[in-house]
Image (cartoon, rainbow, N blue to C red):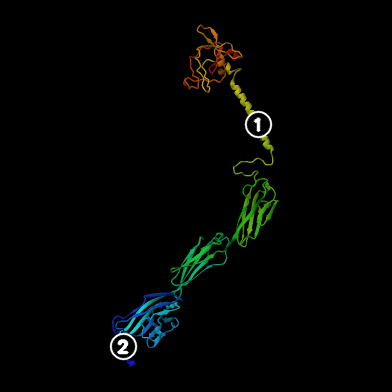
Amino acid sequence: MALLCAGIWALLLALHVPAGDGQMVQMDSSKSGFVGSQVELRCIFINSNPPVKVSQVTWQKLLNGTKHNVAIANPVLGVSVLPPYKDRVTFKQAAVHHRTPLLEDTTIIFSNLRLDDEAAYICEYTTFPAGNRENMVNLTVYARPMTRMTLTTPTIVAKGQRRKMTVATCVSANGKPPSVIKWDTRLKGEASYQETRNNNGTTTVRSNFMVIPSRETHRQRLTCIVTYQNEKITDSVVLNVQYEPEVKIEGFDGNWYLNRQNVQLTCRADANPPVTIYQWKLLNGSLPSKVEIKNNTLFFKGPVTYELAGTYVCDATNGIGTRTGSVDVNITDYPNLPDGDVPQEPHSAVPAIGGAVGGVVLLGVAAILLFVFLRRRQRTFKGDYSTKKHVFGNGYSKAGGLPNHPPMPKNLQYTEDSDDEKKPAQIGTTGGFEASERNFDAESEDLKRPYFTVDEGESREYDERTLAFQYDPEPEIADDMISQTDGSVISKKEWYV
């Protein structure tokens, strides 16, 4: 009887004769997981009404077109898991393990995934008398990469080379899918990239970072950023670059002057490893006698003298090499003041006293010359300006204004000049001379003031502060009188004296 039933079952499977409608197998189209993790592969059988009998459920791996059994659930024989899945595949529902005919849910759990677990998996239901029903899920297995960053060498030596070299390497190994590497740094360099496909389906990505080793690259940070799917992995290193000393001399401020105290020069060196030897020398000569050397500093004892001038050189040496720094020192007589003033000689007051005396003498001579010049201008020949006789009207400017001077007579005649002040006489209508003493006392002061003449082209009227002028035809000059260029006349007697 059993043999008969088995034969009928095999015939039905071969012919796929359905015994009813509505049976189906529900599964996810795809699932994924990382190496070493677990994943759940769902398989649910939707029975018909009336239901059909499930005779067996088989999980199979489809690889390169060939099916390989993974696990079997039979209501009579129980559960069987085949190698190499025996320790890694289990049915989710515990009832399946107890030989139950209820096999509607045959979901399996895949643990400790391996890269070679990646494949298509078929869940196949064998029913009676409906035949077989199946569905399929694609399993993808990912591999998280191993990321590391290393220095090419623990110590990078920069010694006079100006070519780029690899200083650090970033590796993302055995990743699936491949990673993407980027660098984050302030260094000016360039990166190279290389991908290697491994036999197990993973990819190793390698990137080298190259720079020119120098003092500027020392202690700079390099960060490698690995992007794997939506995850970012970072790693950093700090460069250790050894280089020759970078030397400079400090202390000379350009204001070393005679008798200045407490001056010194210090040799500063930036080096890795640190400087072990400092050597001082003076070009074209030896160091001054009053100098003390302590470590990297020159201390000049006593006041500054011209002996300190020259070019000072400092040689700094470390384990990588020797470099040199220099400074030109010049000595001035006086300190350089911010406002540009030149101070007085600090050690002698004689030049200052001599300059003061000379200034007083010079002022005295200038005052005498000015007095003589003004005196000569005030006098004409032997007499005073007040001895001149003016035939034209003269105006005298005076602050506050003066009353208008009465019109000058047309004809003036002067008596013999004397050393006393000359008095003008008005010629009357009868031709006789009358002494004109009217207002002489009031006008004598005005006659002694400086005078000026007015050209005919200028206005005859001025403002109220200036005397008005009235020009008359040039009068006849007596035979014993001589006219002057300023409009005045003097006697021949005074001219020839």
State which quarter of the image contains the C terminus: top right
Left or right? Give the position of 373 relative to 137.
Answer: right
Q: Which residue is mark 1?
A: 360
Q: Which mark is residue 393?
A: none
Depth order, front residue of 497/321:
497
Left or right? Give the position of 370 relative to 45.
Answer: right
The amino acid marked with disc number 2 is Leu
Give the tally of numbered discs. 2
How packed is label 1: few (under 14 Cα within 10 Å), some, or many (20 or more)? Answer: few
The percent position of residue 95, horizontal first and vertical second, equals 39, 84
C-alpha span from label 1 to label 2: 147 Å
In this picture, is 179 found above or below 257? below
The residue positioned 35% from the left and 83% from the top of the image is 125
In this picture, is 371 found above or below 231? above
The residue positioned 59% from the left and 21% from the top of the image is 378
Depth order, front residue of 334/211:
334
Q: Quadrant of residue 294?
A: bottom right
**Circle 2 sits in a helix, a strand or a loop, which is it?**
helix
The percent position of residue 339, horizontal first and vertical second, equals 59, 42
**Circle 1 sits in a helix, a strand or a loop, which is it?**
helix
Left or right? Give the position of 68 relative to 396.
Answer: left
Left or right? Give the position of 79 relative to 308.
Answer: left
The amino acid marked with disc number 1 is Val
Q: Quadrant of residue 107?
A: bottom left
Depth order, front residue of 163/223:
223
Task: Specify which label sits upstream in the sequence, 1 or 2.
Answer: 2
In this picture, is 309 found above or below 490? below
The residue positioned 66% from the left and 30% from the top of the image is 361
Depth order, front residue of 85/64:
85
Check contact, mark 1 vs mark 2: CB within 8 A.
no
Q: Which residue is mark 2?
A: 11
The percent position of residue 137, horizontal first and vertical second, equals 37, 77
